[in-house]
Image (cartoon, coloured by chain):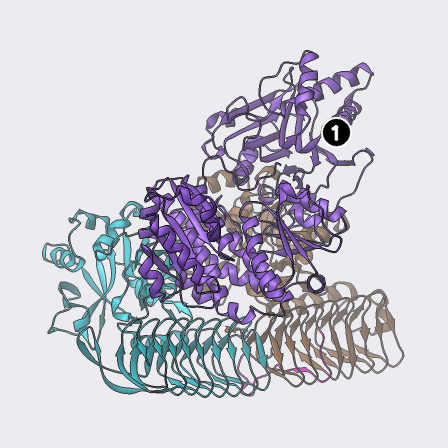
Chain colours: A cyan, B purple, C brown
Amino acid sequence: MQAVILAGGEGQRVRPLTHSQPKVMIPVANRPILDYVIESVEKCGINDIIVVAGYRKEQVIRYLNDLDTGVSVVVQKKQLGVFDALRCAKDLIKGDFLLIPGDNYIDSESLSRLKAERNAMLTAEHPYPSNYGVVSVSGGMVKGISEKPALAESMTVSTGCFSLTPDIFNYPATCMIPDIITDMAKNGRPIRAVPANRWHDAIYAWDLLKMNRMALEMVKPSISGNVSKSASITGHVSIGIGTVISPYAVVSGDVVIGENSYIGPHTCIMPGTSIGSRVRVEPFTYVENSILMDDSSVGSHCRITDSVIAKGAKLGSNVAVEPSYSAVEVDGHFFKAFFGSVVGDNSTVAPFTVLKHCVIGNSSAVENGRIIEGFLPDGSIVK
Amino acid sequence: MCGIVGYVGERNAAPIIVEGLKCLEYRGYDSFGLAVADGTATDGGGKLTVVKKQGRISDAGSDVSLACGNIGIGHTRWATHGVPSDVNAHPHTDCTGDIAVVHNGIIENYAELKKTLIAEGHVFKSETDTEVIAHLLEKFRNAAAEKGLSGIEKVDFAVKNLMDTLEGSFALLILIRGFNGLIAIKRFSPLVLGIGDDELFASSDMTPILEHTQKILFLEDNDYAYLMPDGIRLFGYPSAKTVERDVKTVDWDVESAKKGGYEYFMEKEIFEQPAVFVNSFRQKIDDGAVSVLKKASSITVVACGSSYHAGLIFRYLMEKYCKIPVRVEIASEFLNFTTAKGTVVIAVTQSGETADTLAALRHAKANGCPVFAVTNVLGSSVTRIADYVLYTRAGPEISVAATKSFIAQCAVLLRIVSIIGKGIFEKELFEIYPVLEETLLFDPADASAVCKDAENIFYVGRGVYYPISLEGALKMKEITYIHAEGCAAGELKHGPFSLLTPKTPVVAVCTKDDAYPVMISNIKEMKARGAPVIAIGSGGDADLKEIADIFIPLPRSKNICEVISATIILQMIAYNTAVLLGRDVDKPRNLAKSVTVI
Amino acid sequence: MECVILAAGEGKRMRPLTASRPKVMLPVAGRPMLEHLIVSARDAGIKDFILVVGYKEQDIRDYFKDGDRFGVKIRYAVQRKQSGTANALLCTENLLKGPFMLLNGDMILDSDDILAFSKSSVPCVGTVESSHPQDFGVLDVDGAKVLSIVEKPKEPKSNLVNAGIYLFDTGIFAILKSLSLSERGEYELPDALMQYAEKGMLSHFTLSSWFDIGEPWNLLDANEKMTKAIFAKTAGGDGVTSASASDFIKGTIEDGVYIHGNVILGEGSVIKSGTYIEGDCIIGKDCDIGPHAYIRGCTSVGDNCHIGHSVEIKNSIVMKGTKIPHFNYVGDSVIGSGCNFGAGTKVANLRHDRRDIRCDGRDTKRRKFGAVIGDDVQFGINCSVNAGSWIGSRVKAAPNSYLSGKINDDTVLGR
């Protein structure tokens, strides 16, 4: 049995976090989402894995090359949908295979059950089914899929994980997967609907926080680096090589901290927090339920909660995040969501800024302490 | 002439030799060959099979498998004397066909030796310098026989006389029909031995050996050894007395580099550079080395190729920030110069085997200078000459064109600047990782589209960007075969200006540093000659964007980080252009990875 | 009969102890565990060994050399890449001539068992009865015949599991080579066994005792068993005091030392006054014990150790060069070489709720377990090490530190 993992799409809805990497490479609990998928696939006993890379393929390949297990990589030149991506792997496919999106978390137990079936798909219940292919199921069999319908008939959605046979390649190249599945279902090639155990998709950047909390539960606690004995470290905490935890820092798990980072004196790193490598958190700062990606830094006396701070972003001192449950506009659509802030790659935020339920694009600069609300596109400068 | 391998043991030698040569292919790949003998046959008996071909060992066909025997030698060649061809490929044999020799290095007095040998009636088949070795051995063996010597004494006599006669640099492996073993000789060219279970190996570097054993014996210059099924006999020249050399256990994982989904190794290596830079810069440096560096009143860097450019970058930064005079010399020219006692000499060489650089370092050491080596290869020859070794943490580099090893050299040299300059760049470079990651997002398509149709490309810069222009031009010509020239921007109007036309693109590196205003006026002058200008500048530089035909903004960062970013941009342009032109990026014609001949 | 022993692996689950030595060289009752296996096999009449080595092979070669010291002949085969047991076996192809025994290097067997097993018909697989067969390869048998072997099945068909001891003839190599690569890209030994089983050729033999050493805490059980075995064999089992067991005592015992149980004391070692030893202990060469030390349980102390004043050590393994000099307590722990315990540093070995101790997320299945501590760890004074701690090599802990959970190599617990 083989597995084809799709890692070619950008994942535009997670912008601004896909500036330097595709969605599959976004870290939750300091590991790319793709890493969890590969782990689940291996755990269910499949070792012949093909990854289809596309958007920012270099970053994906670099990461795959560092894995212990060999993974074949094929490149999708243009992002022309799932079936096109699958067709890129056609030459390497020897028989029945699993098709798995690389940007959702899926547990290995579900994959094992999927693997046991020929022509099947993993389904899940989702409170907002309209973001997905909504599946109509009857008697355990798929009747059809309607892709992102305005009005969903059921809460059952496709996880994008399929167990397939090579004859799917008989469909013309221009077909779309939902149409193929619907067609197969109609033409006497029954597709079994297999409910998934644990499946999680982050649609928008702030959804990563939930996935992050889930992933943190799986972290094996271990301590490395240079840890002050007067720091308080409790609960599930993992600290990487070369990281400094200063005196009187309070690290309260679930927390993961990467390599060569610096956690200053009197800081509080509270549950639900992932801190990447080479990150600086200066004294007296409070961080909770947030992701601080590699090379980001947070000045002293900040309060950062429910936020995603992307690679290389720099927050000055006394920055406060004020999370709320309110509407944000993305691509002309309004969504209600609870979060604090999302700060894009390499952006800078001046001291004494208040980030009030906002998304700041990549390489932006907030140059004076003020209140930021709503959405700032890439390259914004707030004077 | 670059990589050699030998085997003595119980297994069939040919497949082991072929696999070994594949590991050494980076040292040369225009032809290959091997000789295999059955050592178990008694003197005078046995068969000696020679197979040699033009082309790459990785394309070696089935004829290699016909060679059968428990002793073998092999060679993968990078032509110096004589064009790449079947006949010039090693091994070379004497008139009788009883002696086969593979050689890495250069015999300096081969012309006169060849003349004498021809006069004595020897018939030469190839144009190589190596063939004289085979004929000389034949001659000395005959002389020994006339003296009534036989067996091992005959071999002793021949080897001793051979070493008396040859001048130059050589690592030799010699097979003689009827002699149950092989002879290994080292003088100024790399050769290491491997000790396995009832089997022995010899090779230019340890990679082919590590497949079989971790016990490595590093030969010293003028050592010669007989590798026999019952063990190694090791002698020093000219004493001809038994010598002892340490056998080291090398715990090194032979992880064959894989390029995964990358099209070429060069692409892979370019994308590894952020981590390589950071690891090389942040490594721990020996206290002794630090104290010597801190006391340095002047520094001389010796290097070749890209390493030389790294030396030049070092020079600009060292002189500017530390006010310490730095000389950078091309290693092959270094012997012409004197070095004041007390000058710290730093040899920069990726492989640690570059013959010119080794010779220069020996020269400096003889002058009583403290010598440093900056190299990527553990246990390489340079590490045994230098007083202090700073390793670049680049990992194996497969592509012939240096990218990550160059960046790693820059990182280590910057670290030296930082040590002497009391930590000046530490803080700036602490933040370089995301800057380099951001640099890698650059899409070179526009710039490459201009470059690929050009016949000549100029690279210009001022200050530290002058050597970076040289390196950018080197990358371009190495892998695209387009003529490219690096130039100090101020020098353009002293000559090269006459070459500018609308068909000669100029790549200008112009960040907002001290030289910015003059660079801008230089670029305007070039534009006036109609040359298309590809300008690499600081992020958000609206003026430069206005002037240039193609403007490539560097990620916003500190000046010192821009130096590294700009280098990577130039690599990416060269790489992308070569791919557009359909070149064999990893193995450009006529080039070899480490040049161990002078 | 020739005997192949697989000793090439690192034994990642044995970290941090295997960072500087191969798994089979870990000490049990004062000797490398591999020595016990070779000696058992020798006593069963096997004289000709081939060790498949790889990870840190030099340590194994330097210790066992050509086997002369043990009255056997030892040859070596090198497995360069650790890619499966079948692959390791393939490395020995050129060295074997007839039927041979194959043993995993990380277990301890009884020589009577080996002798009886060696008389089985070839090919044969040794088995043991296990209370948790789902963790192993489980056999389905029909009388003497093996029908199938299934790796870690959810519903085991029997409680007979593969013990990692086999009899083969050289025909196995053709089978190994005929196997297609598994999905892991390895040649798998169970696949070869299945080929025999399918042809109805594979027999099995149930061993009476079997000790698999996979986790650091297994060393404590193995140590206890082998220590007792050594004394049972030579001294007739009954508790003997120091004076009458002079064969075992090569070092010096000062006046006022009370020894209750059996002790082996290596050359150059001194046990100073006031020391009290209970139980069967093995102490290496050039050790400095006491004054007033209290050692109990089956404790093994390596060469050049110092167990000092008012120190209590219970049922632990202490490797060479480690110093536990003043006011320390160490219970049910495995301690690497070159460590230094600051005065007053103690290792806990019992939970308040009396539940089994977990270490690095794994269940030790022991109610009492202290810590696994790597090499060259330095504790300041008065450190407290919690039960179930996993402490990597070269960790440094400031005075008064509290250590708990997993602390990786080179971590500094600073002020």
Residue at position x 80%, y 70% in the image: C287
Magenta span: helix, strand or loop, mainly? loop
Residue at position x 35%, y 43% in the image: B501
B431 lies left or right of B253: left
The answer to which quarter of the image holds residue A184 is: bottom left
| Residue C341 counted in the magenta span | yes
Residue A328, placed above or below residue C188: below
Of helix, strand and loop, which one carries label 1? helix
Please state the chain letter of the residue tagged with numbered disc 1 in the rendered image. B
Asked if residue B550 can be seen in this view, the reply is yes
Asked if residue B176 can be seen in this view, the reply is no
| Residue A350 counted in the magenta span | no
C10 lies left or right of B184: left
Give the amino acid at mark 1. Met
Residue B389, placed above or below residue A352: above
Closest to the observer, C196 or A305 = A305
Residue B421 image offset from top left, x and y in percent: 62, 67
Mark 1 Cα within 10 Å, few/some/many (few <14, many 20+)?
A: some
Residue B216, placed above or below residue A284: above
Locate the C terminus of chain A and report the quarter of the image it occupies. Answer: bottom left
The answer to which quarter of the image holds residue A194 is: bottom left
Residue C196 image offset from top left, x and y in percent: 45, 44
Magenta extent? C340-357
> Which residue is farthest right?
C255
Residue C387 image offset from top left, x and y in percent: 59, 80
Residue at position x 11%, y 72% in the image: A150
C190 lies left or right of B365: left
Count the numbered circles shown. Answer: 1
Closest to the observer, B269 or C118 = B269
Residue at which label 1 appears = B163
